[in-house]
Amino acid sequence: MRAADLVTASFLMLLGGVVVFDAVRIGIGWGTDGPKSGFFPFWLGVLMIAACAVILIQAARRTRGKAFVTRRQLGPVLKVFCPAVALVIATQWLGLYVAAALYTGFYMRWIGRHSWLAVLAVAILFPLATFFTFEKWFLVPMPKGPLEAWLGQ
Amino acid sequence: MGIENLVLGFHIAITPYNLFVAVVGITLGTIIGVLPGLGGANGVAILLPLTFTMPPTSAIILLTSLYWGALFGGAITSILFNIPGEPWSVATTFDGYPLARQGKGGQALTAAFTSSFVGAFFSIVLITFFAPVLAEIALKFGPPEFFAIQLLTFSSFIGLGGGNPLKSLVSILLGFILAAVGLDIVTGQLRMTFGFIDLMKGFDFIVAVIGLFGIGEILLSVEEGLSFRSVPTGMNLRVVLDTWKILPRYARTFVRGAFIGFWMGFKPGGATPASFMSYAFAKRFSKHPERFGKGELEGVVAPETAAHAAGVAAMLPMITLGIPGSPTAAVMMGGLIIWGLQPGPLLFKEQPEFVWGLIASMYTGNIIGVLMVLAFVPLFAAILRIPFAILTPVIVVVCAVGSYAVHNSMIDIWYMVIFGLVGYVFKKLDYPLAPFVLALVLGDLAENALRQSLIMSQGSLLIFVTRPIAGAITTVALLFFALPVLTPWWRRMRGTAPAAPRGA
């Protein structure tokens, strides 16, 4: 936990620095019609740096506690996170519905070891149901790819 | 005057369409409350794009009903699965899960739903009477008063939120910083975009909510393995009626819980401390405190009453002041803005049908809600028997759909993933998420109130102290900010040990 605390606080402190830098660039003082654009962000950044500095000191003084994430915990977390990232990348190229079908099918087969029949049923019906709910019923368009173009949607 | 308006509201809330909307909302809400990784706040966020084409009153009824459903659903997982869906359900697991393991799950669930209903109803009655009065007062507020209220909102997270006050502060600051990214509407200047066109639009808090509470929550909940263990519900009409015969014994606990809940609840972040406080009080005043934690029905009644009273009370500042009391209320307020309504005191003057329809729907929604969950608990609990490998991809896809739908932009799905990671890390390191979301929502409003106040005073911060109402609110806010420093000092003065025994 200690290491993660130090890294997070340092990162946030750096972010505070970036905010202050940008605020100073656009002006933190009094303009012709009130405070300039950088006024509010400047003080946010300053407070951020100060608060993170104290958190850093607090964390550094502490002895090492339990780990931020154990090896046993990290496995399941990555097994959820990595496919989710793959889903987003696939959505960019294939559209949401095809990506969702591939992702659901892959996940069910890989993690759940479900039968191919169940995999196919869910991986086809779930995106279809999503399609009709969003595109047809509520008229909310989703990203589409080559398959939808080929089907003329 | 209040009664006539309420009657007007009921005329709107009990049209067949709006009742149908409420039933749909409660059903979806309960499902969302039961599912891991989907709570009230991001459930409302995901469904928000679907309401763009609806009339505003029906839209808010859908979203509030969803919220009630999610609150009820949280109790189901706490009792049957020992998984608190929301932080304020943690206290419910203390006695709810032991009861379920003893085969008294039906009793515990009946008690939980009934208590939730009583707590919520108490707060709704108070809102009915207080909201118009508060709105009337708030109409006289200027920018300094509104900024003072914002200060109070955020100071209560720091002073009363528990945990490390500095981390609460950092969460708030990060929310404000992200809110400031993009175009400054006052001066027309770009801020913190560093030349990236995608950053010009800024960060939408709805996407942040879906990422932080949706993806982040799933990552957290899978750490302990990829499955859930359940206990049978044991629910039937007989159990319900028998439990209802016992419950009047806990009348005092109900009243205490409802008061604690309302009092804590209209301040931000109040639901969780309210539920713990109510639990601690019930244990303290019980004749059998030793039974608590081993399956005492009163230990379910106390936190559930308070948590729901608080959950409903969080709506009060949203409709009267335009300042949401919880992340869920914040998302709803975002909805109001998208539907073209201005949240705040003017709503009562300009949109009485909307406000009173909403208040009346709180009554109808909770009545329908408690009957529905009592009747269909086994069905809702069965959702968690769906294999994990199907639930997870479905939830992730639904979150992605919800994020994309806000602005039809692909970058928002990426933001969702990033916010999911941030939520996971923040949760583990005890950076609270609720103040982060509220700051992201209120960022522009707070900054504008501050700027206008400073223009009024020509740059002097004294304006927040010298105006009577603003001064009083600022004083309380400063007190809250100082509380984490004052409390240890006060304890040392009185000579008590700094590590006070915990109530629960």
Image (tube, coloured by chain):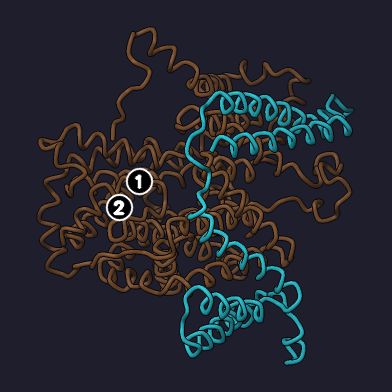
Q: Amino acid at mark 2?
A: Ser
Q: Position of residue B364 (x, y in %)?
A: 35, 61
**Residue toward you, A93 or B328:** A93
* Amino acid at dot 1: Ala
Q: Colour of chain B?
A: brown
Q: In this rendered view, identify the residue nearer to me: A20 or B237.
A: A20
SS for callout 2: helix
The answer for which chain carries disc 2 is: B
| Res B132 label | none
Q: Between marks 2 and 1, how big is the CA–CA gap?
A: 8 Å
The residue carrying mark 2 is B116
Q: Earlier in the sequence, mark 2 or mark 1?
A: 2
Q: Are marks 2 and 1 in contact (CB under 8 Å)?
A: yes
- The residue under label 1 is B307
Say left or right for B457 vs B326. Answer: right
- Which chain's colour is cyan? A
Q: Residues within 10 Å of mark 2 (few under 14, many from 20)?
A: many
Query: Is residue A21 toward the left or the right of residue B64 in the image?
Result: right
Q: Is residue B52 visible?
A: no
Q: At which x and y percent is residue B363?
A: 35, 57
Most extreme residue toward the front is: A71
